[in-house]
């Protein structure tokens, strides 16, 4: 009995964490699907989202709930600018993986050190969306503010799904993800689709930062761990699969939370890597992926 | 005539889409077989199954009587099957000489020997300035290097995926001669997967027509060209294209 | 073959080697000898990283971590097995080879970015283990270890580092110019095309990664016994960033590029010490600008200019 309660509580924590990973991972998987690249600056998009929220709320006194859409808008523009200025040669010159990996890694490094230099290396605590309180469900107690923030994440995810499923640009994204040459032949503007995809993914990562940094702490390298976890998540779910990204996030959130109670809390951040190794060993195409050799 | 390649009821699907359905074909020694069909007929998928880039859902592929189904691509090449790619995959940052020599390495261990063989192939294909980078060539040269790279592996069977796509009519005539010369000089069998009709019809001993993953006709070029079923799918495609 | 007159390239190489050998007699300042020795260490790491990224087309994020594996394996075996640091360095090298085989076998069979993701995960898990297992590694305080040579001067270390660097560059040169080197480049250009001409791409990738990682671990082990302290900092992302910046700026996919880049940025880095926090910001900017606009880096761009001026093809 003494073990069961913490397990249930941690299971819920796992689900909540999973919804944040999903915000990151869905953006990452969209970028991969449309552009065939992994964005190694994704964690820094998260970090920037956190800082923008922090300054909007503390300096300008804007309410968190109002600031959140502003963060997403700003990050959307930022993501598009990154695509236009740094990633465009991938399409125009057909550059390989090395280029996209090194340039996004360089961007990541730049943003982290930019933040250290101009926002300061110390921890910041953005004000919470609502005051901390706990909800008691019988003997189980969960954190109400976390639940609210996770709900916001879920709402954003649903909205994203609607954009991809119902809008014209969403259709273009799906078409490009399936077959880039085909989409180009059908007269789709691949540049525009790539730009929009980067914008959307950046906005999602920014939202994740703006939400999660009120619970965790904010510092220039705060994005590293969430980013690495979302890489594991998209490998677990299947690169390019949106359903896979969501399912993978929930699974990872639960594995981590259970590992913390059942094995060791010190290695909490290492469990995701064990998951990655298992995925590579057993099912490299991911849970929702199809094994395709690109020829 | 000895059978070089025998594919038996090959089926391959992606998700719900069946790309190749119960497809069989044979290639004899020294034979040039044209494999034609509209876009999405499954020609490239079939070629990927034969060369090991895809595993078939069912069916078997025999090369020189040996079952090669499911072997990895490099092992299939070692057996003696070479290919070119529809979307060419040049070794852009390597010189023509290096690229073709890399192909020879599957047969010879020494780099000197590989370069000697590459040099022979370069002369045969009449490629100029082999010290140029593969990323700086024109379309015809790119195709020839791709061909040379495959030839360097000393194949008994060579599969060409749309080698004439993007070539001008005069260049297609040249390519036709080159292919026949390759067959005679190197003594190998060819499968020519093609969209460009004049090339296939001019070069093939036999033509296999694929549509929606299945074989719908087979025979000598002139027989196939007058086959009503073939005419229908090609006309249909042309109308479809005009509409699109 | 040796009777041929020396090519301009060969002449410049020889000149550079002679210059590096005689530098300690010219620069009497111990501090700059120290800086150069560190520069050689980075030049080894950049050269080996370049074999992966510049020739095989695979980006490893575990490169600094492999230096740290070598350093820790060597330091721990010197501490517990009481072996001489030279033997420790050999153990460090083997440790790097073993780990790289494991990671390579797992992730290099797959295409695309799985390898990079796996190396990132591995580097991070390694950092966590080193930090958490405090009793063995002294965590972030670092593990003190014996010096390789008992001496008051940096000059002996300078020559050991130079020998390691020359060994690395020379063996890399031999490999890249061998039949296996052709295979490495073929896989780096197009994996599918390489397989289609009979190259076992998985084997080529795993063997190359093993070679590169073993040398990196050796360099890391040397570094530990040079500084006398092994800390998680050896495997940190900052170090990786430095290695990437050096390779990219010097010229990725060229043999001298990473060496030039490493020595240049190491000096630059010493000057930038007073700017502290802006140092990495500048390096990051260098990576982005070079990769975006001068993809061939310093050496590649210079070579191109010289050739176009000289007028030869």
Image (spheres, coloured by chain):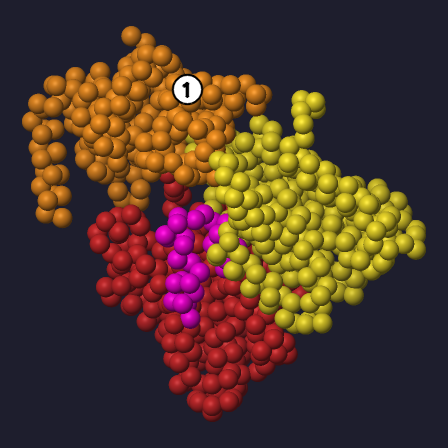
Chain colours: A red, B orange, C yellow
Where does the image place residue A100, in percent across and percent down from the top left? 47, 54
Disc 1: CA contacts within 10 A as few (<14), some (14-19) or many (>=20): few
Above or below, A251 against B131 in this view is below
Magenta stretch? A78-105
Where does the image place residue A63, in percent across and percent down from the top left? 43, 89
Above or below, A262 against C20 in this view is below
The quarter of the rendered structure image containing the C terminus of chain A is top left
Q: Which image quadrant for residue A260? A: bottom right
B11 horizontally vs C76: left or right = left
- Please check the rendered image and state whether residue A79 is part of the magenta-colored stretch, yes or no: yes
Where does the image place residue C226, in percent across and percent down from the top left? 82, 53
C245 horizontally vs C130: left or right = left
Where does the image place residue C271, in percent across and percent down from the top left? 71, 66
Residue, disc 1: B123
Residue occupying image coordinates x 16% and y 17%: B220
Going by the picture, which residue comes out furthest to the bottom?
A61
Q: Secondary structure at mark 1?
A: helix
């Amino acid at each position: 009995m003494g073990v069961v309660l913490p397990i249930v509580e941690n299971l819920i924590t796992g689900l909540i964490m999973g919804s944040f990973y999903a915000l990151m991972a869905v953006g990452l998987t969209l970028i991969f699907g449309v552009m065939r690249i992994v964005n190694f600056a994704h964690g820094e998009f998260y970090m920037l989202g956190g800082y923008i929220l922090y300054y909007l709320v503390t300096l300008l006194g804007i309410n968190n709930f109002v600031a959140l859409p502003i963060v997403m808008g700003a990050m959307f523009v930022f993501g598009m600018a990154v695509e236009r200025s740094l990633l465009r040669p991938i399409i125009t010159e057909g550059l390989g993986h090395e280029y996209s990996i090194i340039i996004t890694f360089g961007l990541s490094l730049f943003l982290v050190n930019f933040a250290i230099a101009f926002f300061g290396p110390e921890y910041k605590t953005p004000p919470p969306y609502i005051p901390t309180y706990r909800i008691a469900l019988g003997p189980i107690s969960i954190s109400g503010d976390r639940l609210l923030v996770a709900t916001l994440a879920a709402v954003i995810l649903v909205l994203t799904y609607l954009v991809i499923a119902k809008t014209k640009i969403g259709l273009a994204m799906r078409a490009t993800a399936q077959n880039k040459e085909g989409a180009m032949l059908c007269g789709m503007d691949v540049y525009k689709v790539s730009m929009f995809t980067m914008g959307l993914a950046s906005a999602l990562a920014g939202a994740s930062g703006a939400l999660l940094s009120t619970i965790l702490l904010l510092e220039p390298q705060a994005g590293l761990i969430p980013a690495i976890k979302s890489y594991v998540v998209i490998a677990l779910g299947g690169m390019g699969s949106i359903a896979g990204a969501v399912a993978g996030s929930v699974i990872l959130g639960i594995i981590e939370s259970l590992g913390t109670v059942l094995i060791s809390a010190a290695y909490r951040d290492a469990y995701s890597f064990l998951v990655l190794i298992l995925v590579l060993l057993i099912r490299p195409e991911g849970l929702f992926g199809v094994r395709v050799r690109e020829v | 005539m000895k059978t070089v390649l025998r594919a038996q009821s090959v089926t391959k699907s992606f998700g719900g889409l069946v790309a190749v359905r119960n497809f069989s074909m044979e290639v004899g020694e020294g034979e040039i077989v044209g494999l034609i069909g509209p876009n999405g007929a499954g020609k490239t998928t079939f070629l990927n199954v034969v060369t090991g880039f895809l595993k078939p859902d069912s069916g078997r592929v025999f090369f020189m009587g040996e079952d090669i189904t499911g072997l990895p691509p490099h092992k299939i090449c070692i057996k003696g099957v070479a290919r070119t790619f529809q979307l060419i995959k040049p070794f852009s940052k390597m010189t023509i000489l290096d690229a073709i020599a890399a192909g020879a390495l599957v047969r010879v261990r020494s780099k000197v020997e590989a370069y000697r063989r590459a040099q022979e192939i370069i002369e045969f294909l009449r490629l100029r300035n082999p010290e140029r980078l593969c990323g700086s060539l024109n379309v015809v040269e790119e195709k020839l290097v791709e061909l040379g790279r495959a030839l360097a592996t000393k194949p008994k069977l060579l599969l060409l995926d749309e080698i004439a796509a993007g070539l001008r009519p005069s260049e297609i005539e040249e390519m036709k001669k080159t292919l026949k010369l390759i067959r005679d000089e190197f003594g190998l069998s060819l499968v020519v997967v093609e969209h460009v009709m004049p090339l296939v019809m001019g070069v093939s001993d036999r033509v296999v027509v694929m549509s929606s993953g299945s074989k719908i006709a087979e025979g000598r070029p002139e027989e196939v060209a007058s086959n009503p079923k073939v005419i229908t799918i090609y006309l249909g495609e042309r109308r479809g294209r005009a509409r699109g | 073959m040796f009777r041929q007159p020396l090519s301009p390239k060969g002449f410049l190489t020889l000149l550079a080697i002679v210059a590096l050998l005689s530098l300690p007699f010219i620069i009497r300042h111990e501090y700059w000898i120290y800086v150069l020795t560190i520069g050689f260490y980075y030049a080894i790491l950049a050269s080996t990283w370049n074999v992966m990224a510049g020739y095989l087309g695979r980006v490893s994020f575990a490169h600094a971590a492999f230096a740290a594996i070598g350093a820790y394996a060597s330091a721990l075996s010197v501490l517990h097995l009481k072996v001489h640091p030279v033997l420790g360095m050999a153990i460090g090298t083997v440790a790097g080879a073993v780990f790289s085989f494991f990671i390579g076998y797992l992730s290099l069979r797959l295409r695309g970015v799985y390898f990079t993701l796996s190396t990132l995960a591995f580097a991070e898990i390694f950092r966590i283990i080193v930090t958490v297992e405090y009793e063995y590694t002294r965590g972030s305080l670092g593990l003190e270890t014996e010096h390789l040579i008992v001496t008051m001067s940096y000059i002996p270390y300078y020559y050991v580092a130079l020998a390691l660097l020359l060994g690395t560059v020379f063996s890399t040169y031999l490999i890249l110019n061998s039949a296996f080197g052709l295979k490495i480049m073929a896989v780096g250009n197009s994996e599918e095309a390489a397989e289609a001409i009979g190259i076992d791409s998985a084997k080529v990738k795993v063997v190359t990664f093993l070679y590169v990682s073993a040398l990196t671990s050796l360099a890391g082990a040397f570094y530990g016994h040079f500084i006398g302290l092994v800390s998680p900092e050896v495997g940190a992302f900052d170090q990786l960033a430095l290695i990437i910046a050096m390779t990219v700026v010097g010229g990725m996919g060229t043999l001298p590029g990473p060496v030039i880049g490493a020595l240049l940025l190491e000096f630059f880095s010493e000057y930038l010490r007073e700017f502290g926090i802006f140092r990495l910001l500048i390096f990051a900017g260098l990576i982005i600008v070079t990769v975006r606009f001068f993809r061939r880096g310093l050496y590649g761009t210079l070579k191109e200019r010289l050739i176009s001026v000289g007028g030869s093809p």
